[in-house]
Image: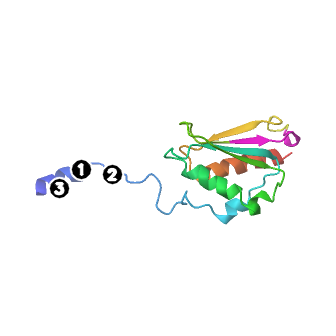
C-alpha cells in the first residue's frame, strides 16, 4: 500500500475542470447582459431546429426569451420566425440585418445575414454573439 502511494504521488495531478468553479455560469443569463440587447439593426430572426434532436435546449430557451414583449420592444418591426423541422437538421439561428445600419468603418455589408449554429453553444453564448453583432452595426 505504501509503495502504491509513492508511485501515485509522482504523477501529475488530474485536472477536473478547465475553469474555476467561481467562473460565471453559462446556463444563467444575467440581467446586465439582457440590458445590452438592442434589436434596432435586426430585420428578422429565424430559428430552425428539430425538437427530437438532443441539443436543442439553448435554441429553445433563446427563442422563448427573444419572443417576450420586453425584449422585442427595442424593435417592434423585427419579425421572428420559428421553423420546426422533423429532418435531422442541426439547430441554427439566422439573423437578417436591415440595410440602414451598414458600418463603413468595420466593413460590415448592408443587409447581411448572421448564421449561428447552436448545437454546441449555450443560450448565453448565442445571445452574446447576437448582442455584439448588433452593437457593431449601431456604431455608425
Q: Which comes before the other along the chain, label 3 or label 1? A: 3
Expressed as whole percent of the image width and height from the top left, the position of residue 50 reads 56, 43
- Mark 3–mark 2 Cα distance, whole angstroms, equals 15 Å
Name the quadrant of the N terminus. Answer: bottom left
Q: Give the residue furthest to the bottom.
A: 31
Crowding at dot 1, Cα within 10 Å, few <14 / some 14-19 / many 20+, comes out as few
Crowding at dot 2, Cα within 10 Å, few <14 / some 14-19 / many 20+, comes out as few
- Mark 1–mark 2 Cα distance, whole angstroms, equals 12 Å
Q: Secondary structure at mark 2?
A: loop
Q: Which comes before the other along the chain, label 3 or label 2? A: 3
Q: Which mark is residue 10?
A: 1
Name the quadrant of the C terminus. Answer: top right
In percent of the image, x 78 and y 55: which residue is there? 38
Residue that numbered label 2 is attached to: 14
Q: Classify residue 95 as left or right of residue 53.
A: right
Residue that numbered label 3 is attached to: 5
Q: Nearer the viewer, residue 134 or 77?
A: 77
Expressed as whole percent of the image width and height from the top left, the position of residue 120 reads 53, 44
- Mark 3–mark 1 Cα distance, whole angstroms, equals 9 Å
Expressed as whole percent of the image width and height from the top left, the position of residue 45 reads 73, 45
User: Magenta segment, which residues?
Assistant: 94-103
Q: Nearer the viewer, mark 3 or mark 2?
A: 2
Q: Which mark is residue 123?
A: none
Expressed as whole percent of the image width and height from the top left, the position of residue 139 reads 83, 47
Q: Give the residue furthest to the right.
A: 100
**Tag 3–tag 2 contact (CB < 8 Å):** no
Q: Secondary structure at mark 1?
A: loop
Task: Residue 100: say if magenta.
Answer: yes
From this view, report whether residue 36 is shown above or below residue 11: below
The quadrant where residue 86 appears: top right
Q: Secondary structure at mark 3?
A: helix
Task: Residue 95: say if magenta.
Answer: yes
Amino acid at each position: 500500500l505504501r509503495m502504491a502511494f509513492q508511485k501515485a504521488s509522482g504523477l501529475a495531478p488530474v485536472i477536473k475542470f478547465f475553469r474555476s468553479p467561481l467562473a460565471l455560469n453559462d446556463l444563467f443569463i444575467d440581467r446586465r447582459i439582457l440590458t445590452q440587447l438592442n434589436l434596432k439593426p435586426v430585420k428578422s430572426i429565424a430559428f430552425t431546429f428539430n425538437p427530437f434532436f438532443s441539443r436543442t435546449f439553448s435554441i429553445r430557451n433563446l427563442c422563448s426569451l427573444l419572443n417576450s414583449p420586453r425584449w422585442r420592444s427595442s424593435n417592434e418591426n423585427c419579425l421572428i420566425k420559428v421553423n420546426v423541422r422533423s429532418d435531422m437538421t442541426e439547430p441554427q439561428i439566422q439573423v437578417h440585418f436591415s440595410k440602414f445600419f451598414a458600418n463603413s468603418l468595420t466593413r460590415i455589408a448592408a443587409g447581411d445575414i448572421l448564421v449561428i449554429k447552436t448545437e454546441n453553444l449555450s443560450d448565453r453564448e448565442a445571445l452574446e454573439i447576437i448582442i455584439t453583432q448588433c452593437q457593431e452595426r449601431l456604431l455608425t
